[in-house]
Amino acid sequence: MANSFNLFTIKILVLNCKGAGNQNFKRTFVDLTQAHHPDIAVVMETRISGQRVEEVSALLGFDNVCYFDATGFQDGIWVLWIDNNISLNVLSVNEQVINTFVQVCPANPSNPWLFITIYASPDLSKCLSLWTELEAFNPYPHHPWLLAGDFNKIVAHHENLSCTPPNQRRISLFSNFINSCNLLDLGFNGPKFT
């Protein structure tokens, strides 16, 4: 989701890995980064924490990592970046979001923007709290912003892959959040429901 703006030549990889501690993740991540050369990578649902985060993230080829630890074997979110083309400053971190301020080509101060990484809880009350936080979070009101990640919510019935029909109230609440923040869905690349 994003306000419309030009990202210049920056590349961002967003991956819900369902466990960053296994060899399949490392192999897949390295393959994706070698193919696409992202400046920023977001890894969600890492399911690891503490020293293990430091060990695994050090092997991924990025200069920096900011993370929120997994809780037990659930959750976890990382933002990794390379200093060559960007300056990234972390503004805040919690279990569902990492807020950052990004400047492409740091020598040029005319293009900074907010990059907000989301790994939303499936719990509706936690999502409502997150949405309220995001609606109020605007430390740089004249800068564009990009939200990327997994909201764990849908905006239409066709986005659901389940025998159980989606909850219309939840769809409406999520749609209202998107509209209240003037966000645009940028879509995705790859197979549906992955």
Image (tube, grey):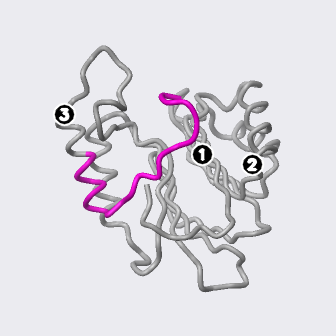
Of labels 2 and 3, earlier in sequence is 2
Whole-percent x, y for residue 58 in the image: 80, 46
Q: Name the residue under label 1.
A: 14
- How many residues crowd mark 2 within 10 Å: few (<14), some (14–19), many (20+)? few
Q: Are marks 1 and 2 in contact (CB under 8 Å)?
A: no
In the rendered image of this protein, does residue 17 appear above or below residue 69?
A: above
Say which amino acid is labelled 3: Gln
Give the magenta range: 174-194
Whole-percent x, y for residue 120 in the image: 41, 42
Q: Distance between the residues labelled 1 and 3?
A: 27 Å
Say which amino acid is labelled 1: Val
Q: Name the residue under label 2.
A: 36
- How many residues crowd mark 1 within 10 Å: few (<14), some (14–19), many (20+)? some
Q: Mark 3 points at which residue?
A: 168
Element under disc 2: helix
The residue shown at (51%, 55%) is 98
Q: Residue 53 sits in which quadrant?
A: top right
Question: 174 or 96: which is nearer to us?
Answer: 174
Say which amino acid is labelled 2: His
Q: Distance between the residues labelled 2 and 3?
A: 37 Å
- Position of 131 compared to 36: left or right? left
- For the stretch drawn in magenta, the main secondary structure is loop
- Position of 38 compared to 1: left or right? right
